[in-house]
Image (spheres, helix red, strand yellow):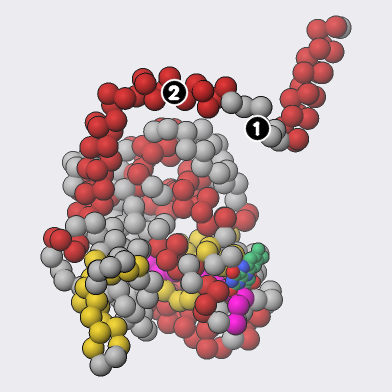
Amino acid sequence: MKLIAFGCGRKYGNSEVFIKTALKAAEAKGIEVEFVRLKDFEMLKCTDCDLFCQKDVYKCPHHQDDTPYLVEKFLDSDGVIIGGPVFSLTPNSIFFTFRDRMFGPKMDVASLWELGREPEEFVKGRFKARPGALISVGGALTENWTSLGIPNMYSATFSAQTDIVDHMNVYGVSDPAEACIKEEWLEKARKLGENVADAMLTGDHRWRGEQEGLCPQCHLNLIQIEPGTTKALCPVCGIYGEMTIEDGAVKINWPDDFEHRRDNRLTPKGKAVHLREIREHMAMYAPDVERAKELLKEIKDYNACELKSPIREAKKAELLAKAAEKKAE
Ligand SMILES: Cc1cc2nc3c(=O)[nH]c(=O)nc-3n(C[C@H](O)[C@H](O)[C@H](O)COP(=O)(O)O)c2cc1C
C-alpha cells in the first residue's frame, strides 16, 4: 500500500518536517511512502480554458508540465497527505495551483457514481475513496492567524472523495528548522501518520483525529451563521445545523436528513446535486448565449485601460525584431 504526500512549503521547511515525520510513522507500519515537494515540480497555473482539462489531464494545454505525472502518482496511491504553510490566513498559492491542476471535475467520483459517466482512460480502475490527512503550518503565535488554512486545504479533497481521517493546524512555527524542536507538534504529526496508515490498512476511514470539532464531518470549528435565523452552515462541507443556546453556550445540532444534508460536499450524492445544478444552469443560460457574446464585445473594445506585461511585451518585440532581421537577409 502506497501513501503519497504533497508538500507546498519550503525545501526542508517546517511543513516538510511535519509531513516527513508523519510519513516515517506510516512507514514504520509497513506502508510504502512517497513525498512530492511541489516547489521542485513544474506546474503552471490553471487558465480556466473551458472544458478540456475538466475531462482529461492530458487534454490540458499545460499537459507537458509535471501535472500528468503527479496525477498518475496520486491515482496509484492508497492514501494521501497534503501539507503546507499558511500565507495571509490561507494556504499559499502553490497549494491552489496544485488543487486546480490536479483535482476538480476530471477527478470527480460523483459524476461516475451518481450520473453514470464513464471514467476517462487515464483514471480507469483507479478511482477509490482514499484516507487522507491535512497539515497546515503557520508562524503566528496564536491559531487566530491560521484560520483558513485547513478549511481551504479540504477543497482539494472533495473531487477524488478523499476521506480525511486527521488534520493538524500548527501555529507558532515560523523560522526554517524551527519545527524540529517542537516535540508536541512532532508527536501529533507521528500520530497523524499512524492514523492514515491504520485507515489504509483496515479500510476503516472514520475520523481518528484528537478533536471532534463543531462540524461532525470535517471536524472544524468554522461555522457560518445565516443572519436572522438559527441556521448554521459548515462552509467546508455545505451541511446545515440548527443552533441553540444551552447553559449559556452555543450548541449545534446537525440533523442527518435531506433538508440539512442535501449539499453535503463530502459525499458523492451531495456533489451530484451540485453537478445537476450546473447542468440546469447551462440549460437555463443556453437561449442567451449568443446575446451574451454580442454584449461582451463592448467590454472587449473597452481596452485602453488594460496594462500589458512588460516581460511579455519585450519578448514579443524581440521576436518581431528577429523576424524582421531574417526577412531582410
Ligand atoms: C507571505 C507570507 C505570509 C505569511 N502569512 C502568515 C499568516 O497569515 N499566518 C501565519 O500564521 N503565518 C504566516 N506566514 C508564516 C509561515 O506560515 C511560516 O513561516 C511557516 O512555518 C512556513 O512554512 P514552510 O517552512 O513549510 O514553508 C507567512 C509567511 C509568508 C512568507
Q: Residues within 10 Å of mark 1 (few under 14, many from 20)?
A: few
Q: Quadrant of ligand 1?
A: bottom right
Q: Are marks 2 and 1 in contact (CB under 8 Å)?
A: no
Q: CA distance from mark 2 to mark 1?
A: 19 Å
Q: Main secondary structure of the magenta part?
A: strand
Q: Residues within 10 Å of mark 2 (few under 14, many from 20)?
A: few
Dot 2 or dot 1: first in sequence order is 2
Going by the image, does 275 lie left or right of 4? Answer: left
Q: Which residue is mark 1?
A: 306
Instruction: Locate residue 133: give its quadrant.
Output: bottom left
Name the residue type under label 1.
Glu
Q: Which mark is in front, 2 or 1?
A: 2
Q: Which residue is mark 2?
A: 295
User: Which residues are the magenta region?
Assistant: 132-141
- Residue 81 placed where, x, y %? 44, 66
**Residue at coordinates 39% horizontally, 25% vertically from top-left?**
292
Q: Residue furthest front?
A: 228
Q: Is residue 288 above or below residue 127?
A: above
**Residue at coordinates 25% horizontally, 93% vertically from top-left?**
247
The quadrant of the picture occupied by the C terminus is top right
12 and 277: which one is in front? 277
21 and 310: which one is in front? 310
